[in-house]
Amino acid sequence: MTIRAPALIVCVVLLAACTLGPDYHRPEMTAPPIYKEAAGWKIAHPSDEAPRADWWTVYNDPELNALVAQVAVSNQNLRAIEAQYRQAVALLAAAHSSYFPTISTGLSGSRSKGPGGASAELGVPARSTAVNTTKLSGTASWQPDLWGGIRRTVESNQAAAAASKADLAAALLSAQSTLVQSYAQLRVNDAVRRLLDDTVAGYARSLQITRNRYKAGVAARLDIAQAETLLTTTRAQAIDLGVQRAKLEHAIALLVGKAPAEFSLAPTSTLPVLSDMPVEVPSALLERRPDIAASERRVAAANAKIGVAQAAYFPSLTLNAAAGFQASSFGRLLALPNSFWSLGPAFAEVLFDGGLRSAQKEQAIAVYDQTVAQYRQTVLIGLQEVEDNLVALRVLADESVAQQAAERTADQAAQLSMNQYLAGTVDYLSVVTAQANALNTKRSGLDLTARRLVASAGLVSALGGGWQAEPSQ
């Protein structure tokens, strides 16, 4: 009985429709309807109100905008991760190539001579002759995807490429957030330096007043010593700020892909503007956070590899074809009588592997379970980070109100103590104490501003920044 070619093709197509392994469904992850610390925050609905790609522009700082724009272009860590993404895309293209036959061609020539044979009549060895062989051939080989192993491999690599793309977005968001936080701390450092420089100038005037009073005989030598101590201590604090500023400047240089020696930021008298931003509902994190999207795509990749492992249990079919010409000389190579061809299928099945395929399947299932747990943990960490920054911003906002009141009363106390000292009703120690307290209160206010700016950038990063998962994911 002869199997006709069309029937064979139909059978192959029907078998190729089979796909082993479980179909992918996103692991269940129940997000709370609202954040615990979201009281008083505006929920971003619809999502068009949420921060988009240029989320850092809300701080209204042109220099910051220019720096953040350089991160995506010059940061070397991002370049490395972008190269990893291109590797993943290349692996996906390689997996796609398995759908198609492999076709090759070759042209070869040889001259050979074998051993001579014995002459039956003469009883003496016969001479062998040299033979020329020229061969032009083409071969084709195709392995139909009978059990869906190739489809599952493509599916796994496609999910892995999507995960790598999300990794790139997560790294970019992290670098942008770190730069915004470092820049905010640097500008607050500049503000503290201006405060200390102004305070040093004020303390110098107080010292001069004290010296004049000492010369007039209405102040003790101890008053001068106390005034000089306060002045020099404050001057030392101003100098010490240079260490922190230099480190922050170096960190920013690294983020924008420059050597510290090639980068500098001049001090300014302005701080980034701290503005309120709407907060999306918790479930939106599943789409807006690139690290969560990357983790979910790795679950999909691991799920597809289970199908690849299952397909290894079944036989493989390879369709082979070859055709060409072979002759003793190149001039007669393309003559029709010198042509040859072959066509035929080849089935292969592993009968015994000592449990290898079973172990590979169990490994694939275990990897899938691991990625599911990692995905859920990533979601929980994302929720925690949002909650942490929400409570930080809420508490720090309340603290800022109290801090401003403390600064006003500290200034008043310092002025009153100086007036009383000039009137001779208190000693200079009271003035020193009040002035030091006023300075410390103002520094605490600036530190509070830095913490609020850092928490603000942290919240944007925790919410996913301006990144949005693709619908296919």
Image: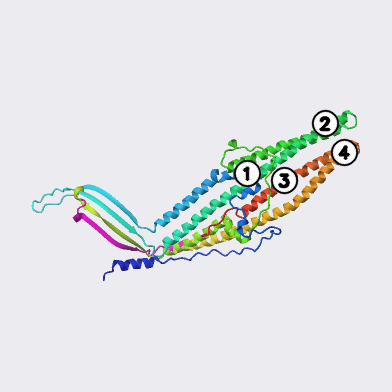
Q: CA distance from mark 1 to mark 4?
A: 43 Å
Q: Are marks 2 and 3 in contact (CB under 8 Å)?
A: no
Quickly name the residue at label 1: 64
Whichever of labels 1 and 3 marks the residue nearer the N terminus, that label is: 1
Badge number at residue 208: 2
Whichever of labels 1 and 4 marks the residue nearer the N terminus, that label is: 1
Q: Nearer the viewer, residue 180 or 274?
A: 274
Whichever of labels 4 and 2 marks the residue nearer the N terminus, that label is: 2
Whichever of labels 2 and 3 marks the residue nearer the N terminus, that label is: 2
Quickly name the residue at label 4: 419
**Residue 348 appears in which quarter of the rendering?**
bottom left
Quickly name the residue at label 3: 447
Could you tell whether 255 is left or right of 429 in the image? left
- Label 2 amino acid? Gln
Label 1 crowding class (10 Å Cα cut-off): few <14, some 14-19, many 20+?
some
Q: Are marks 4 and 2 in contact (CB under 8 Å)?
A: no
264 is within the stretch colored magenta: no
In front: label 3 or label 4: 4
Residue 215 picture location, percent across and down: 88, 28
In front: label 1 or label 4: 1
- Label 1 amino acid? Leu
Q: Are marks 1 and 2 in contact (CB under 8 Å)?
A: no
Give the residues in magenta.
Answer: 333-360
